[in-house]
Image: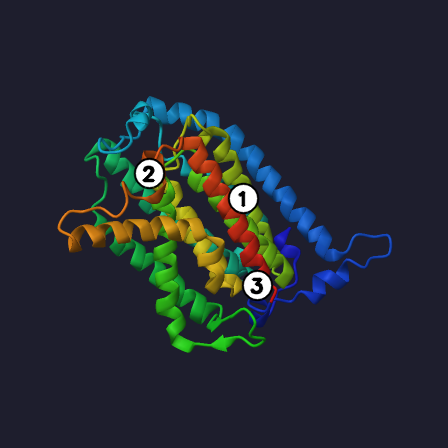
Amino acid sequence: MWCWLKVPTPCTWTRLSLPSPVRASGRTGKHSRSENFMAYSLTLGTISFLLAVIWGRPLITLLRRWNIGKGIRIEGPQTHQVKTGTPTMGGLMILIPVLVITGVLNIANLMGFTLIGRSVLVPMGVMTAFGALGAVDDLIGVKVIPTGLLGRYKLLWQVIFATITALFLHYGLDLRSIAIPGVPEKIDIGWLYIPIAIFIIVGTSNAVNLTDGLDGLAGSIAAVAFSAYGVIAFLQGQIWLVAFVFTVVGGILAFLWYNAHPAELFMGDTGSLAVGATLAVVALMTGQWLLLPVIGFVFVAEALSVILQVAYFKLTGGKRLFKMAPLHHHFELLGWSETHVTQRFWLIGILSAMLGIALALI
């Protein structure tokens, strides 16, 4: 269990230590400790997948019974109109198994408020808070008004949650530096870490939310991005973080089981806001958050397409830079099928994740 692990010092969270796991691979007939921890983490991911898949079918049944179905934008691609009424709030399928597994395996550390306990509490708390905000937004969108929670209120709560998280990361876990590829020593940025962390958490949360528009798109890209940071955390020796990351990956893969085209279940804001914010926190806790735009390149491109579309529309008095934003809809209107867009974006996500890991090793 994670509570068996040796408590790391704060400096081990952000120092990419390649020699340790590499040297450990020179074993003499027995698996190294690092390999055992990776096996443990991957096993947790498998357990998370199985629990989420089993939990998914009754969840879909309940959501249908309660008429929690997604409304589709009239101005969107006409091929999407058949999706009207598909159950949303599918993020619950990911969140609940991840939180249960993580909480149970770390109960001693959480109750003792140890360093690992505090560290595990951060991604768990972020996932819970942003998931709850997304659930409120989804419910309002289904039961009250189709647009859901007003944007300014949603952004306000995102900033509040992100601020609490950033303060805890800075003062509770003593995270305050930036790792730059090619620079051997990390740079201490002091209190500037706090506003940067807030921006990263809010920005990534919204970027994943904007990407969640095609069957399998946001989930597949998120699974790749989390896996990339799982590799980075493993090379750093942050075993507890590796275990958490692959538990999340297992939950996301289970969600994709039901979200594959044609989707039986949508992630909703319940999932997209929580997954995005949690990914940001994982990046911050590895210290390799500067690589998040690389590893999460697709998320960044999707968010930028919306920003550029709105800005261009206002500056030109009604003209559009893209046929439709976010970017995945632009390619749909160019004639790409939904599955082609998803698969090609996923391939780009894999390549960008590979590049991100490579840069982390420099």
Pointer 2 or 3: first along the chain: 2
| Residue 254 image offset from top left, x and y in percent | 52, 34
Q: CA distance from mark 3 to mark 1?
A: 20 Å
Foreground mark, 2 or 3?
2
Name the kind of residue labelled 1 in the image: Val
| Residue 9 image offset from top left, x and y in percent | 59, 70
Point out the residue furthest to the right here.
29
| Residue 111 image offset from top left, x and y in percent | 52, 56
Identify the disc placed on residue 155: none
Name the kind of residue labelled 2 in the image: His
Q: Residue 62 falls in which quadrant of the image?
A: top left
| Residue 228 image offset from top left, x and y in percent | 56, 52
Q: Is residue 111 visible?
A: no
- Identity of the residue drawn at 40% across and 47% down: 274
Residue position for label 2 = 329
Residue position for label 3 = 360
Pointer 2 or 1: first along the chain: 1
Residue position for label 1 = 249
Label 3 secondary element: helix
